Amino acid sequence: MKLNKSMILTVAVCLSGVVQASTIDKELSTENKELKVTKLRASTADFGIFKIERSLSSVPSSIAAPERVVSTKGEMAIVNIADDSATDVVGKGTVVRNTMTDELTTLTGNITILLNKNVNASDVASVAGMEVLSVFPGTDIAILKIKEGNDLLEAFNAIKQSGLAIESRVEVTETIHEAQ
């Protein structure tokens, strides 16, 4: 008799659980149908996922004009600059935007490369107009530094076109500013 009661109780609990799970599943499936994408932002990147922001500059907060400040963090501020004063040379300190996260940061002026087999870092540096900053012994990884006055974007594209490197990545400082 106890066995029959326990079996009936077990079946009732299981049946209740199945019905409840079915109800929850129906609720979730109707909720998912209502989700819509409201905003899609697409922009082309200059360095991997980073886009150069030529109209922005990084300056100390103490000298930044308040009406031009886009964002601040600590003692540094990102400010809008006049289009005619924007420099065409991309280098150390140039402001870039991460196209995935919309965060602003600055360039270090370095490019990390993975060399093809039997290629020297100095060969790639001479093709790109850069200097070898560091080579990691036992690997095909090197860090190149842009020479003063040279354009980092042109050097990055020269490395890509040369075929001497398998992969190259521009280095950025830590993400210092979030989008407003």
Image: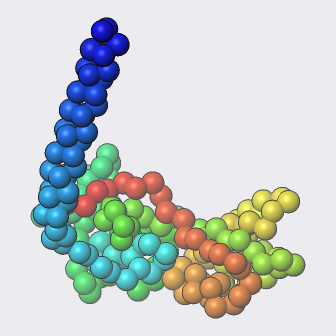
Q: Where residue 57 sits in the image (x, y, percent)?
A: 32, 69
Horizontal side, residue 96 vs residue 85: left or right: right
Q: Where residue 94 sits in the image (x, y, percent)?
A: 42, 71
* Snapshot quadrant of residue 67: bottom left
Residue reaching furthest to the top? 2
Number of numbered markers: 0
Which residue is located at x 35 percent, y 13 percent? 3
Q: Nearer the viewer, residue 11 or 81?
A: 11
Q: Nearer the viewer, residue 99 or 34?
A: 34
Q: Is residue 65 visible?
A: no
Please say if 91 is above or below 79: below
Residue reaching furthest to the front? 1
Which residue is located at x 17 percent, y 52 percent? 26
The N terminus lies in quadrant: top left
Residue reaching furthest to the bottom? 161
Q: Nearer the viewer, residue 101 or 55?
A: 101
Q: Where residue 144 sits in the image (x, y, percent)?
A: 67, 71
Please say if 4 is above or below 41: above
Horizontal side, residue 135 vs residue 97: left or right: right
Q: Nearer the viewer, residue 39 or 34?
A: 34
Q: Where residue 75 sits in the image (x, y, percent)?
A: 32, 48
The C terminus lies in quadrant: bottom left
Please say if 151 is above or below 144: below
* Snapshot quadrant of residue 171: bottom right
Horizontal side, residue 105 vs residue 110: left or right: left
Horizontal side, residue 28 vs residue 127: left or right: left
Which residue is located at x 69 percent, y 90 percent? 162
Which residue is located at x 19 percent, y 38 percent? 20
